[in-house]
Amino acid sequence: MKGTALAPSQHIRSPLGTTRTSGMARAAAALLGGALVLSACGVQQAGAAAIVNGTPISDKDVQSVAVQLNALPQVQQKLTPSIVLLNLILAPYVLAEADRTGKGVPEAEVRKVVAKVHNPSPSTMDFVRMQLAIPSLDEASRASILATLGKTKITVNPRYGTFDVKAADILPTSPNWIKPTASPVAK
């Protein structure tokens, strides 16, 4: 059975003057684009190094903490972005546990450490506060933090690695599309 094609004047037009088929094509393209964005690897928010329970940690924060703290004379080993990101992921949980157990770190103590940093960011302050609080936590507190992390949705941008809850660490990743080649056999 043969169909008949519609003449251009018979196409259904929307109020904006576009044909329904082109509107449907645009809608399909938008859905496809949205699906591609949502199915992309890792973080689904532009500029995010990680998303922790829906709260983003920005690349900008990671970079500013690294720059501010690496400029301090007492820093013996330079902080990498992955180390900074790990600490920014852990900070809210460590600080909450330190406060809960009465081992929180006062602002004045944090300010002493970052005294040579011009206008330290809130993320830098949290990073330092967490570093000062960790030694005061006992094994029960550390176990509590790990238990909480186990229930937390943490998505890390693949360029930083992947978050391992059991190790409480960011592990480096290699792109799975790079396949090792067989070495030529010498004769």
Image (cartoon, grey):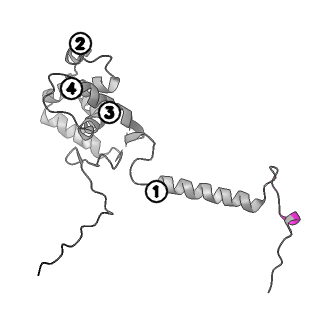
| Nearest-to-viewer mark from 1 and 3 | 3
Q: Which residue is drawn at 76% across and 60% down?
A: 20
Comparing labels 4 and 1, the label whose residue is closer to the camera: 1
Q: Hey, what amino acid is under mark 1?
A: Ser
Q: Quick one: label 2, few (<14), some, or many (20+) residues within 10 Å?
A: few
Identify the mark nearer the N-term, 1 or 3.
Answer: 1
Q: Can residue 141 be seen in the rendering of this structure? A: yes
Q: Which mark is residue 39?
A: 1
- Element under label 2? helix
Crowd class of label 3 (few under 14; some 14 to 19; many from 20; radius 10 Å)? some
Q: Which residue is drawn at 49% across and 52% down?
A: 37
Label 2 sits on residue: 108
Q: What residue type is labelled 4?
A: Thr
Q: Residue 101 carries which label?
A: 4
Q: Is the magenta stretch mostly helix, strand or loop?
A: loop
Q: Which residue lies furthest to the front in this view?
A: 187
Locate residue 186: give its quadrant.
bottom left
Residue pictured at 29% horizontal, 34% vertical: 88
Inspect the magenta stretch and tell me whether residue 36 lies in it: no
Read off the residue under disc 3.
63
Q: x, y percentage for residue 59?
A: 37, 37
Q: Where is residue 15 in the image (x, y as percent from the top left)?
A: 82, 50
Tell us which disc is closer to us: 1 or 2. Answer: 1
Q: Quadrant of residue 57?
A: top left
Mark 2 or 4, closer to the camera:
2
**Could you tell which of marks 2 and 3 lies nearer the N-terminus?**
3
